[in-house]
Image (spheres, helix red, strand yellow):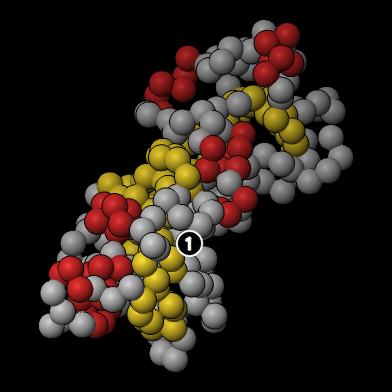
C-alpha cells in the first residue's frame, strides 16, 4: 500500500484497509473497516486493527473519509477469503444506504463533480425553463443521485434521477426534497435539469453547442422556445430552424436549433 488513498465513494459498502499514521495500537498493522454513509458526517469507515477478532461486529474506531492516507478497497474474493460478511450487522443502525454500485460514480462526465464526503451528491443547473420566457434565472443546486435511467435522448451522457437537496432561491416549480431528472453531460458547466416535455421532443431537434460554454441542450422544449420567439405563428407553422441565446451565458452567444427532418 504505497500510493495515495483510492478510498472514496467507489468504496461505499466495501471493506477497506487504511494505513493510519497513528493508529491506537502498537503493531504496524492496517486499519480494517467497512465503508458506509453516515447521514450527517458523510462517507465513513468503521473497524479497527485488522487482526482483532472482534473487528467486524465490534468496531473500535470510526474514520471519516476521504482521508489522505494510503489505502485500498479489498476485492470481493479477498473479503470472502478473509471471512468478511457482505455487510456487518451494525450497519442497520445507520439507516438506508445508497446503492452498492451506483454506475454514476464511475461516469467520466461526472468525475470530480461529487461531494468528497457525500459520494452521490453533485451540483445540477436547476431552472423553471428558459429565462427569456419565465423571467427567472437559473440556479446551481445540490442533488443526490439515485438511479441511472439510460442514455440521454441526444448527444452523449446519461439521464439520471435524483432528489433536490437544497431549496432554490428563486424557483417556484421545484422544491427541496422533490424528485428530478437531469442530463449528466449536456455540455456547459453543470449537469442540467430536464422535464418530461423537454425529453419528449428532444430527439426531434438538433441543438448546436454554444460556441462559448459548450451547452448543447436548452431549458425549454424547442417547440416552446419557437413559440416564445414567434408567438403569432400557428402551432403547425413552427420554424424548422431558429437561433436562441445560450441559456447559460446569454447574449451574444447563440445556439442554432434545427428540427430534424
Ligand atoms: Zn453558453
Q: Secondary structure at mark 1?
A: loop
Seen at 68% across and 11% down, the residue is 80
Q: Is residue 65 in view?
A: no
Q: Is residue 98 above or below residue 230?
A: above
The answer to which quarter of the image holds residue 22 is top right
Query: Residue 224 at what x, y percent from top left?
Result: 23, 70
Q: 198 and 126: which one is in front?
A: 198
Residue 230, position as x, y percentages in the image: 20, 82
Query: In the rendered image, which residue does mark 1 sit on?
Result: 186
Q: To which quarter of the image does residue 27 belong? A: top right
Camera-side residue of 216 and 109: 216
Q: Residue furthest front?
A: 261
Instruction: Locate residue 202 relative to residue 212 in the image: left or right.
Output: left
x and y, in percent, of residue 152 in the image = 45, 50
Residue nearest the viewer, comparing 179 with 165 = 179
User: In the rendered image of this protein, does residue 103 appear above or below residue 81?
Assistant: below
For this rendering, which residue is in front, 88 or 51? 88
Residue drawn at point x = 75 percent, y = 36 percent = 71
Using the rendered view, name the quadrant where residue 168 is placed: bottom left
- Residue 259 located left or right of residue 77: left
Q: Is residue 23 above or below residue 242?
A: above
**From this viewpoint, is residue 77 visible?**
yes
Left or right: residue 198 versus residue 111 is left
Identify the residue shown where x is 40% and y is 73%: 257
Which residue is drawn at the image coordinates 46% and 55% (left, top)? 154
Amino acid at each position: 500500500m504505497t500510493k495515495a488513498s483510492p478510498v472514496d465513494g467507489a468504496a461505499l459498502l466495501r471493506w477497506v484497509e487504511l494505513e493510519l499514521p497513528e493508529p491506537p495500537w502498537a503493531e504496524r498493522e492496517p486499519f480494517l473497516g467497512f465503508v458506509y454513509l453516515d447521514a450527517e458526517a458523510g462517507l465513513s469507515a468503521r473497524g479497527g486493527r485488522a487482526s482483532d477478532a472482534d473487528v467486524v461486529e465490534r468496531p473500535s474506531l470510526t474514520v471519516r473519509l476521504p482521508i489522505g492516507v494510503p489505502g485500498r478497497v479489498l476485492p470481493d474474493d479477498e473479503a470472502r477469503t478473509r471471512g468478511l460478511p457482505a455487510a456487518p450487522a451494525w450497519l442497520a443502525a445507520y439507516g438506508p444506504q445508497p446503492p452498492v454500485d451506483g454506475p454514476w460514480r464511475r461516469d467520466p462526465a461526472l468525475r470530480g463533480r461529487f461531494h468528497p464526503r457525500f459520494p452521490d451528491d453533485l451540483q445540477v443547473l436547476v431552472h423553471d425553463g428558459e429565462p427569456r420566457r419565465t423571467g427567472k434565472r437559473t440556479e446551481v443546486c445540490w442533488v443526490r443521485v439515485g438511479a441511472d435511467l439510460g442514455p440521454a435522448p441526444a448527444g452523449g451522457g446519461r439521464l439520471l434521477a435524483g432528489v433536490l437537496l437544497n431549496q432554490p432561491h428563486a424557483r417556484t416549480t421545484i422544491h427541496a426534497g422533490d424528485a428530478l431528472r437531469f442530463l449528466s453531460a449536456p455540455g456547459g458547466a453543470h449537469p442540467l435539469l430536464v422535464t418530461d416535455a423537454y425529453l419528449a421532443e428532444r430527439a426531434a431537434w438538433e441543438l448546436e453547442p454554444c460556441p462559448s460554454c459548450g451547452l448543447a441542450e436548452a431549458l425549454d422544449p424547442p417547440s416552446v422556445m419557437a413559440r416564445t420567439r414567434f408567438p403569432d405563428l400557428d402551432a403547425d407553422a413552427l420554424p424548422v430552424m431558429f437561433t436562441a441565446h445560450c441559456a447559460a451565458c446569454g447574449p451574444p452567444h447563440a445556439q442554432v436549433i434545427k428540427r430534424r427532418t
